[in-house]
Amino acid sequence: MERVKTGIEGLDELIEGGIPQGSSVLISGGSGTGKTILATQYIYNGGKMYEEPGIYVSLETNLKNIIWNMQNFNWDIRELQEKNLMKTYRLNLGHITSDENVAEKVDEELNVISQMVKEMGAKRLVIDSVTAFGIWFANRGLVRNMLFQFTDKLKNLNCTTLLLTETGGGRREFSAFGVEEFVADGVITLYFTPPHRSIFVKKMRGTNHSKIIHPFQITDKGIVINASDRVLWESIK
Ligand SMILES: Nc1ncnc2c1ncn2[C@@H]1O[C@H](COP(=O)(O)OP(=O)(O)OP(=O)(O)O)[C@@H](O)[C@H]1O
Ligand SMILES: [Mg+2]
């Protein structure tokens, strides 16, 4: 099986060398746990270390957080953009009130992303975040329906995708809508129990992954995981 290296210190060794090529992995965790940093690092390393083009799709009101992270960690986003190794895209579905326009709008946006993937030959994709889809929908049923369609169609792009999802932060919470963890091929959860940060690979299809929780730090180089150390389950709130 081909694997896509995240290049994040300590992470690849928890998952037999990398994420199975073509899969979708959910990165879940409470607010401020490091999801955006991890995903930015995945795209940045892809371009910088492996010359693999990547697209960062943001649903947030603006893209400044990604730019901040890049500057904060001295990652040269402009260089990657000039070499066509990184693109950012702001996704917007507008207001959705019925099942009918869900499919249509999701398709429109997927077509744009698909076009970008083809043009730059993207191998890596990030959706930050699937939780933010919620703001466009009148009810949870519609969000679930859309998430199924969206993640299913994303598979056809043949990218290795990180889907970010914000949870309440509890140790048994792995998704916001209760469906993301089932449609994804992998689930990685980040915890922040001040002052300690930790990471847990809950699932990774086709992979004999680590079954324990590992401490990590956010340093001036981004996320660094201590793969040889463990955190006790009971110590996480
Ligand atoms: N240079 C740095 N050194 C150490 N920690 C940092 C640094 N930059 C950011 N952080 C930490 O990372 C946190 C932000 O991480 P990130 O934006 O990835 O979280 P997130 O999980 O995406 O949150 P949200 O759900 O709100 O989007 C900050 O709150 C801060 O604690
Ligand atoms: Mg974020």
Image (cartoon, helix red, strand yellow):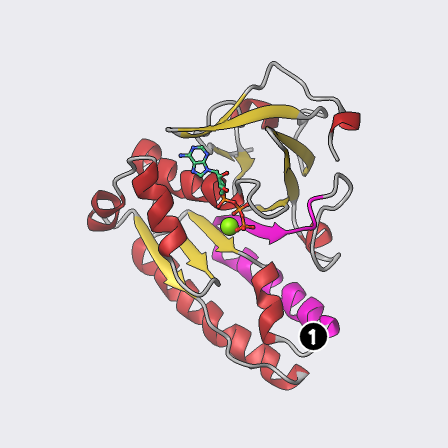
Question: Residue 128 appears at what percent x and percent y?
Answer: 50, 55
Total marks shown come to 1
From what the image shows, is residue 97 above or below residue 231? below
Residue 168 painted magenta: yes
**The C terminus sits in image quarter:** top right
Instruction: Find the residue positioned furthest to the front.
Output: 194
Question: Which residue: 69% across, 45% down?
Answer: 169
Choose between 136 and 46: the one closer to the eye: 136
Badge 1 local density, few (<14 within 10 Å), some, or many (20+)? some
Magenta stretch: give its range: 140-169
Which residue is the site of mark 1? 142
Q: Amino acid at mark 1?
A: Leu
Does residue 52 appear in the picture of this structure? Answer: no
Who is closer to the viewer here, 123 or 25?
Answer: 25
Q: Measured from the top left, where is residue 188 in percent x and y?
A: 63, 39
Q: Residue furthest top?
A: 228
At x 47%, y 76%, the residue is 108
Residue 226 visible at all: yes
What residue is rendered at 78% in x and 41% in y? 172
Decide which of 193, 133 is in the foreground and name it. Answer: 193
Pinpoint residue 129: horizontal percent, then vertical percent: 54, 57
Q: Is residue 206 left or right of residue 53?
A: right
Assign the magenta stretch its main secondary structure. helix
Residue drawn at point x = 37 percent, y = 38 percent: 46
Residue 187 forms part of the magenta stretch: no
Q: Between residues 231 and 162, which one lies in front from this camera angle? A: 231
Which quadrant of the rendered structure holds the N terminus?
top right
148 left or right of 55 in image = right
Q: Considering the numbered disc 1 on the image, is that residue within a helix, a strand or a loop?
A: helix
